Structure formats: structure tokens, C-alpha cells
Image (spheres, grey):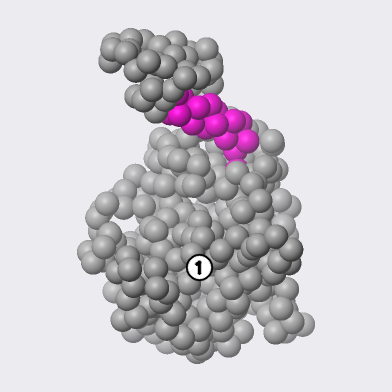
Amino acid sequence: MKHTITPLAALLLAAFASSQAADASRPLKVFILAGQSNMEGHAKIETFDYIGDDPATAPLLQRMRGADGKPTVCDHVWISYFTGIGEENGEGFGQLTAGFGSRRHPTEDGGKIGPEFTFGLTLDRALEEPVLLIKTAWGGKSLFYDFRPPRAGVYPRTARDVEKQRYLETDSGRYYRLMIEHVKHVLADIKRVCPAYDPKLGFEISGFVWLQGWNDMVDRDVYPIPSKGDQTPRYAEYSRLLADFIRDVRKDLQSPALPFVIGVMGVSGAKPNEHIAAFREAMAAPAALPEFGGKVIAVQTAPFWSEELGAIADKNDKVRQMSYYLDSKHQDHANADGNMTEAQKREYLKNYEAELISPAEAALWQRGASNAGYHYLGCAKTFALMGQAFAEANLKLMLQSKPR
């Protein structure tokens, strides 16, 4: 599938240039990005070249790289990135460039991007004033528990939760609180992160982007599969929690009309299973609520999924499945009696993979993918298109709020 660069970007750039020409002395624009592993971003920089293979996205790659071939460093966009593993949270900050994706250590360049890179690049082209991104993201976090908004109350533990000793009441909503605390921490001393900040001009929180969902989608205890005949949407509770999340973020940041962008899960692209399809509907639902009219947009990310890489991923899954079968007796597979040696297994698997995946497909995979399907295959093209789309949606909301 070819990805065309939407003309909305050019229109927004022109509109903002026109509106700012009369007054370039404007407050710092602050944008918040939050979510779980896909907001962290697992696309390795080594997959950048794949973006240039498509004539429609080659111009985007040119903006992502400088004349020296290295990732662009934004002149007017800074980022504070709060993340961590377990209890080891920390902050990385500086001028926006590649490397602010998933990190093993919060303060060290992880060699990856999430949507933040092209989100900031797009804003840098559209806005005259400096921009500050505040990103808070952790892998494996849910909305029903980890990011649970205050007005939803404490997560109601089930008997199964007690049995498994999970979801303690004291930690319900912990990552929501960490997110808000970090945003306020950065805003209390902006110049620490953004040297271009002018206190006399002040700042305004101009947008919030939410990209999350996997841990909620796969939890059958919290979101059980409806029994036959039950017409209740399986993920209706997620829609309710996300609406409360938007309300609480606006309240806690004292920004009642804060533009809010929902990045709707796009894993599996045009061929989602029934669970992913149902979850996409639940994620997008809050944007249709009358109270959020004109201030919340749901951006579908499925169009940015690489279908050609996805097809290769399916074949890789078959190879992994065959490896599993070879390690156990299975009457329908080569090692039916369990007597194959390790050398025989390796040889069989090598031949099986060679028949299934062509050298051209293997080379394409190495060029464009760097992670699993639930991480959008670690494809920089996908994350770059997402970040651009999120920025365009946010700019659209900002334009709509301007007085005529």
C-alpha cells in the first residue's frame, strides 16, 4: 500500500504562517505525549532507509535526516522524556532528534524512535514559536489499572486478582499520577529543559496525544468475551475510562479545552481480528461524545501499518511455530516420533524457512522491520507516519479553537 503525504500538512503550515505573521512573540507551545510501549517507540533508526523506498514518503525521510545523513536535530523543539523499567524511572531531555524512542536507560539514546520524532518535526515547520514535548511512556501498562484516571475510582480487584497477588489498590492509577507529576515538574522550571523559553511570554499547553491499548485489549479478565447473545460491546469499559482520562487530564492540568488526539490501535493493518477491530471502535468512541466535540480527534493508525512487512511477519510466525513443533512429538509434523537430533532439526528448519521466505523478502524484512507485530513491526516508516498524522490532527484542533 502506498502512503501519500496528506495535503492537510501544507494547508496547516500556510494557515499557521498566516496567523503568526502579525505576531511572532507568542508563548511556548507545550504538547504532552503519553501511553505504553508504542508511545515509547520500538522502531530502530536502521530502518529509516525503508521510508525512502516509497516515493510518497521519501520527502518525509528527507526531513528526518540532515545533509550529513544523520537524524535531524530540531532547532526549535525540545523534549523531556520520562520513562523507565519497574521502579527505575528517569528523565532524558534535550533538543528533539532521533533516539527518544524506547530506552534501556531513561537518560541514554536508545537508537529508536516513536511518534515523537516526526510529531515534533511537523510542529517545527508549522509554528514560529519554540515547542516543548513532554513524553511519559512505559511498556506494558494498562488504562484500567496503571493509567486509571482518578474519577474512575480505585480499581476493583477480583478474587482472581487476590489469588494472583496482583493489582494492589495502592498502585491503582500510579502511572497516571507519575505522568501528571512529571508534566508539572517540567512546567515548574521549563528553562531547565528548554533554553529558548522566555518566562515573559509564558507557555500554553496546546495538545495531548494518547497511544496505548495493547494490555487492555488482551486482558480477558477485565474485558471478558461477551457470551452468545450479549450485545454489549466487549470494550465499552475502555471507552468509559478513556473519556474519564481526558476529563481528568484537562482538570489536573487546568486546561479545560485541551486538544486531545487518540492514536487508535493499528496493529494488523487492514486485516484485524475481531478483538482488534472491536478495540479500535472502543478507542475511537470518546471522540464522538458531544462534550468533546471539536476538541478530541481519533486518528486511525491502521493505514500506516506496512502490509508487505506484515505478510513476511506472518511467515516468520510459521517458522517459529514449526520450531516449536520440532521440539515436541507431533504426529502431523516431521518430528512425529521425537527422534530428530538437534542438527536434523536445524537443517529441517533452515530448509523450511528457505521455502517459505524468499531472499528478497528476507532482505526487505531486514531493511524495514526491527520488532514484533504488537510494536508495529518496529518499522520507522509506520511510526514516522503516525507522528506526522498526530501533529496534523493536533494542529487542526488548534486552528478550530482560534477566534474567527
In front: 367, or 54? 367
The amino acid at mark 1 is Val
Residue 100 among those drawn in magenta = no
Task: Left or right? Give the position of 325 relative to 238.
Answer: left
Q: Is residue 240 above or below residue 163?
A: below
Which residue does the image show at 43% across and 37% down from the upper left? 370
Say what secondary structure mark 1 lies in.
loop
- Which of these two is toward me, 394 or 29? 394
Q: How far across and how far down the image is residue 6, in percent?
A: 71, 51
Residue 341 left/right relative to 70: left
Q: Residue 286 appears in which quarter of the rendering?
A: bottom right
Location of residue 324 in the rendering, given as x and y in whole percent from the top left corner: 39, 28
Which residue: 44% across, 10% down? 351
Residue 316 lies in the magenta-colored region:
yes
Relative to 309, say whether 372 is above or below: below
Magenta span main SS:
helix
* Whether residue 121 is visible: no
Q: Is residue 166 above or below residue 152?
A: above
Which part of the image, by quadrant, shows the C terminus?
A: bottom right
Label 1 neighbour load within 10 Å: few <14, some 14-19, many 20+: some
- Decide if residue 225 is in sight here: yes
Identity of the residue drawn at 41% across and 63% down: 141
Relative vertical location of residue 258 with respect to residue 103 in this rendering, above or below: below
Q: Where is residue 263 shown, x and y percent of the image? A: 58, 61
Magenta range: 305-322
Give me the residue at 45% from left, 66% from top: 142
Q: Is residue 54 left or right of residue 108?
A: right
Q: Nearer the viewer, residue 259 or 283?
A: 283
Residue picked out by circle 1: 222
